Image (cartoon, rainbow, N blue to C red):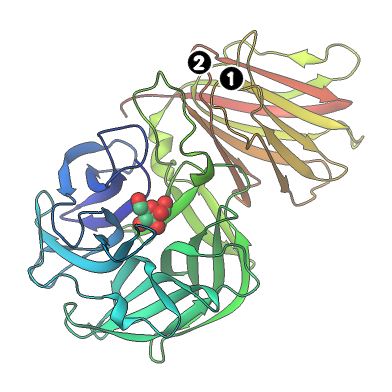
Amino acid sequence: MNDPNGFSRYGGTYHLFYQAYPDGLNWGPIRWGHAVSEDLIRWERLPYALMPDQDYDVGGCFSGTALTWDDGRHMLMYTGCQPDPDDTLGRGLQIQCLAFGDGTTYEKYDDNPVITGDMLPEGGDPYEFRDPKVWREADGTFRAVIANYNRTNGAQILLYRSNDGLHWEYADVLADGEGKPGWMWECPDLFPLDGKYILMAGTMGEVHTICRIGDYDPCCGSFREDCWQSMEQGFDFYAGQTVQTDDGRRILIGWMQNPRTAEYREIDLPINGQMSVPRELQLRDGKLLQTPVRELISYRTDEVVYRNVKLGGEARAEQKFNEIHGRTVDMELQIRPDAGKPYEWFRMRFAEDADHYTEFTYEPETSVATLDRSHAGPGRTDLTRAQAAVRDRGGRLDVRILLDRLSAELFINDGEQVMSAVIYTDRHAEDITFYVKGTAVMNIAKYRIKENK
Ligand code: FRU
């Protein structure tokens, strides 16, 4: 599997569709998988929602989004990949299509496609034109932002509009990629958050997810940026999509994979690809913060707490704690200097056995955090070390670590930074150890994540 799609609330539950290719471990003509959840943590699988079975999407039903239609139907807007016999490079034309359903089964719209390459501005490449994010404005009219590569200007996000959701016209370039990473952007999302708008996208080439924080004006269809930030400092988070909960929270989920390493995998595993833990988004002082969705708290069990423990010093380089181990773990750490005296570094190893570990290090002097999976075992990936410049808090660091069998997600300082990593380490590698050069004081609260609430 790859991208999340159609992340929405419909019929009182969360729906998450996703790019699925069940016939092999690599990417192939892609369909839409479908799962539903009451609480964003436990998911139940439903039948595939879209298959690449029409001449206009036989190359794949690519990514897209969902909304609720006036008559109560669930509408999906997705990119069809239509083979182009005239293209010498064998590429498919990317066109935008609709499907309607009842939350379980979906039927494609008879007049597909609804947006084609003929509706691109000058220079727009019809082979790189995908991933519509569709929504309705307050006046009931429809908008969609779609990713496109412009042969002259590079990455661009295009805005389309429609009065009835079926007949669409090109409106404008909402944003271009000037000065930002990536030769092409994919999977755009545009949503309001705490008084601002966020325009988020996956940036190809330098693979990341970035968000641009600014103002969107629905009347003239323009976006003015205040600043932008990278949303992932680890390895594996891409093609994110958001949904709004009934209580008004904005929740993000992403494909926990780096497209650059998607074809590297542990041969013995029957899966390739997984989703991140859903994250709550917030804007604070102009910065986007991400924290694990609060619903996860009710899956915590077997609490183990250590407070004010001194680590390091002369005594031992490595410290283990009773019952601090496991691979389905939710753990909160606070580290601070001992009596104001700086320590050189703090280090934690997890998914550890005699031969393997993944290592998180923090150096207060430079305030750099490093995640290193070069000893994680199989995976054959060249992306093994990631670094984050962390806000300097005088040696104080808060980290929430989620381990979920083949993954680790680290939320630093209340979600100012997130580092995600797929790790293919054998699941029996369950040790967690701590090291400090110098002396530091640590609080730990560790929980096992249960399968059921
Ligand atoms: C991002 C992406 C999308 C596309 C989909 C195809 O990972 O390349 O742009 O719609 O995957 O599976």
Q: Residue furthest bottom?
A: 220
Drawn side of residue 258 relative to residue 243, left or right = right
Residue wearing tag 2: 426
For the residues labelled 2 and 1, the Cα–Cα distance comes to 8 Å
Pick the front one: 407 or 147: 147
> Relative to residue 344, is residue 184 depicted above or below?
below
Quarter of the image holding residue 293? top left
Label 2's element? Answer: loop
**2 and 1 marks in contact (CB < 8 Å):** yes
Q: Residue at x 38, y 91 (%)?
A: 219
Disc 2 residue: CB within 8 Å of ligand 1: no
Where residue 78 appears, as percent x and y from the top left, is 26, 62
Pick the front one: 41 or 421: 421
Drawn side of residue 386 relative to residue 8, left or right = right
Quarter of the image holding residue 125? bottom left
Q: Earlier in the sequence, mark 2 or mark 1?
A: 1
Pick the front one: 81 or 167: 81
